[in-house]
Image: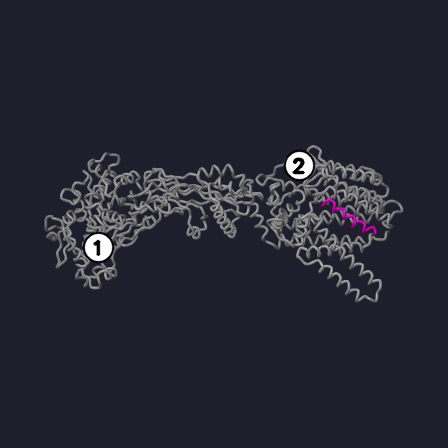
Amino acid sequence: MGSARSAGNENPRLDAPSVWLYAGLVLIGLINIYSATSDPNQGFHFSFNSLAGRQMMWIGGAVLLILTIAFANVAVFDYFAYGFYALIILLNIAVIFLGREVAGARSWFGFGGVGIQPSEFAKAATALALARFLGTYGIRFKGTRNVFICLGLFLLPMGIILGQNDTGSALVFLAFFLVLYREGLPGGLLLTALWMAILGIARIVMTSRGVPHFWTYGILAVLGAVIIWFGRKNRQLVITVSLITISSIVFSLLVGFAYTKILKSYQRDRIELTLGLIKDEQGKGYHLHQSRIAIGAGQLVGRGFLKGTQTKMGEKSFVPEGHTDYIFCTISEEWGFAGVVVFFLIYFGLLFRLVSLAERQSTTFGRVLGYSVACILFFHIAINIGMTIGMVPTIGIPLPFVSFGGSSLWAFTLLLFTFLKVDEKRR
Amino acid sequence: MDLHSNRRIVYFLVFTVVALVYLGKIFSLQVLDKTYEQKAINNALNKITIYPARSIIYDRNGKLLVYNIAIYDLLVFPGEVKELDTSEFCRVLGITREDFLHRMQQAALNAKKRQKNNAYNKSAVFYANLSTRQYTAMQENLFRFGGFYIEPKTDRLYAVKGGAHVLGYLGEANDRALKGDPYYRPGDLVGITGIENTYEEFIRGMKGIRTVWQDRTYREHGEVKDDEFNKPAVAGPDMYSSLDFDLQEFGEQLLNGKRGSIVAIEPGTGEILALVNKPDYDPNLLVGEARNNAYRALVTDPRKPLFNRAIKGTYPPGSTFKTVTALIARQEGVLKPGTMHGCYGGYHLGSLTVGCHPHGSPLDLKGAITISCNAYFCQVFRDVIDNPKYGNVKTGFSQLEKHLRSFGLGSTLGVDLPGESSGNVPSIKQLDRRHGKSWKSSTVISLSIGQGEILLTPMQMANVAAIIANRGWFYTPHLVRGIGPRRSLPEKYTTRRYTSVDSSLFKVIIDGMEGVPKPGGTAWGTDVPDIAICAKTGTAQNPHGQDHSLYIAFAPRYNPKIAIAVVVENGGYGATWAAPIANLMIEHYLRRNEPSKNPGMLERMLKGAVL
């Protein structure tokens, strides 16, 4: 696919392993979309009006997109990064007012029969803009101004998408924290995030178990006091631990407030289901339970292609959305654990490959772009699959390259191949 | 190259950890936990019972007797009934709120039971056997009542109005049937009595299963195309009854206005040609929605129309029993054709007198049968049980008892109807209890003429006639002559049973019986020209009222085609009702489609009433 116009790269072509892994995922997606939407009473039956048929057209479009990228001058990505970013931001704002409402969110533009979701493209645009900024000569992830610009670049679209009421898509932007870690974001910040997560979960568990508030703070205070007592000779430590303890208590207070006052009740249910605090297979936990049934039914080698039973009846399926957000259920039931292992090898193989490619970039632009692709994909995969098996609260985001949908497929293709093109032209 | 390039390790680490943790979780769901497979099947597949058609029942001439119509059950997935407009539902179905709650509770219980048995389907019958009105109303409104669906099955229709006690009726499987046979489900119709009950396992056929895809609202999405999940229903095989329904209906007409039984048997095969009881009922009453009410009315009817007298009613056989006494005496060697006994208005022994009607005296065996002399058979009976060969009366009696049992008396014959009575042949023990230990032949002398402790069902009486017709053997009487295309039959109905009386000893008794309907016989005036009817009248004393009129017969004498017993309760002399009815039956059977040569007698019997 590549063209030999560059002098820098001895082997000027798009990275073959990545392209193959990408093709494999798209094919797996198509097969399982077909299966999830097939009529169990009919044999093989194909129509372009079917969802699988439409996905094939989306794939055709994605191929055109790849060809366009492959023959484009790599300089345009850098050059148009901000413009593209600005355009996408505007579109995302516009969709709040002009879009049509789907499942409570305003994130879709409708054009006749097809729709487009600008938030899908915001990830690619943000990745490019962030890469462009950090790739600018003389700029590094250091200094208040730069740090704030970096954070702003992805917190802005995240906020806008939250405004579209599409929490799932917005959360994915947290992946950029992971990207920035490679560019020098202090590891302590990630550890802090981890500590906050632990605190938050502990707070939620205690709240739902009816443990009085002061226990949380009491335990934290005692814990802090004990550490301070033993390290009382070390002034630095005493100050640090005191700060951590106080801020932890404040954070716990905030979490308690946010959890009960800001989160909607269905969101609290989803979190509590994931934490195993409530078990309600017929009610609140119905979808999670059904999703696990579908996955569990696959057993070691699966029921086989088209033989799945849980995702095939459209909206009234036991696991609805078996071709989009819950496509992992379809894969698991029909191909079993063996299929899941292969699927993981392809997916995580691609992630590893992307990190390796990112590391071989000579430009910050290329590296940041590479890590962005890898981290965004990782977030999507972790959240989506985690949701189907009940390790992450239910958050409706697609499985990249695999789930049905043109916007998602094109946006991820754009993201991946922009980077692969940049990689091809690396010096 | 740059400061943080070793941080790549963190990414590899995070990716790997997440992948492994997820794979571990998925492994536990898919491989370690085996329950999800079944849960998924429970979810997606609904096993729908296909009810087979019950056997069609024909008579021996191929006349259709019993067939099927489609009826419907209302089933429910108890867990799926949400937001049901209960009052509207009750209105459509025509039930009360209490009834609704009760049925819902019951259905939930049954559904739970079925799930335990690994049935895929979590539904249970909510209302069995919907009426046409209920079915139509429900069908129109079903879409509003989530969780309910309708399943077709079959109920009976009768092409005839008679034969109720033979054909039997259906009813909903009771708790015992449900516990005893997992084949049944609450609301299933099973044969309660008649051959519907005896041959239930054949007649019911074999339920089939249709497995359909369903979504989470339990809406059907077509059939699962896999033979493993589908089994067609197998209809019950055609049943060929031994009844000659033309004769059966004729018998029912003859017995109208009377209380009693007619049993006609083909001696050569043991096939029952007619089994008539009066009072009886129209089998069409016990069908469909009216079944339960009609059944209650029949059960409480003081005339006992449900009572199958032919096999459950027991009567002293009276003088018809003299044939048996004579046969046993012949076998015991204490009676010769030429043995003469005198009769002096009865049998006198000390203070004992068994009265007799006036007739010529003395008589030989043939004459004694024809005339039905009591004194003659009292003497014969004493000769049997006081036979010096046996030393004492009890040994002699036990010899008699053994012979009687070989005639199928004192125990159930094994007719293919439920609830057959064994009648009674007194045992020595029973006689000891009744008469004290030191009874003599004179104490039990009335047994000789079929009175006292001896009791027979009309079926046993008809079988005695068949035994005499066959000269010593019989097939267990039965109502079904063939099941299915191969017309197979249980072995017990194709095995000859021999009595302990040698066939050469029957001739004189038959000679005597041939004279019974003729001039000089006890049933003089009831014979049918040109048919040699061998018969014996009986008049059974009835402590509760008027004597029962009895008659056993077979015809023609050579190569007999029909053996018959008639009991008309409170009918008086055997010759009054039982003999004419039996002889008309014989004439009707042997001279099919010909007008009776005894029109006056026929008229009298059809119109006559004994009630």
Instruction: Judge depth for marks 2 and 1 and give the one in front.
Output: 1
Which residue bears the numbered disc 2? Answer: A53
Q: Which of A386 and B401 is in front in this view?
A: A386
> Quick one: quadrant of the C terminus of chain A?
top right
Name the amino acid, label 1. Gly
Image quarter of residue B218: top right
> Quick one: quadrant of the N terminus of chain A?
top right
Above or below, B468 relative to B68: below
Name the amino acid, label 2. Gly
- Place of residue B396 in the rendered image (x, y in percent of width and height, measured from the top left): 20, 60
Which residue bears the numbered disc 1? Answer: B452
- Place of residue B531 in the rendered image (x, y in percent of width and height, measured from the top left): 20, 40
Numbered disc 1: what chain?
B
Crowd band around label 1 with a 10 angstrom C-alpha radius: few (<14), some (14–19), many (20+): some
Whether residue B599 sits left or right of residue A292 in the image: it is left
Residue B423 in sight from this viewpoint: yes
Please tell me whether residue B276 belongs to the stretch shown in magenta.
no
Q: Nearer the viewer, residue A309 or B108?
A: B108
- The disc label shown at residue A126, or none: none
- Place of residue B538 in the rendered image (x, y in percent of width and height, measured from the top left): 20, 48
Whether residue A67 sits left or right of residue A141 in the image: it is left
Numbered disc 2: what chain?
A
Per the rendered image, the range of residues in magenta is A167-184
Q: Nearer the viewer, residue A356 or B569?
A: B569
Cβ–Cβ under 8 Å for marks 2 and 1: no
State the separation of the CA atoms marked 2 and 1.
93 Å
Please tell me whether residue A175 belongs to the stretch shown in magenta.
yes
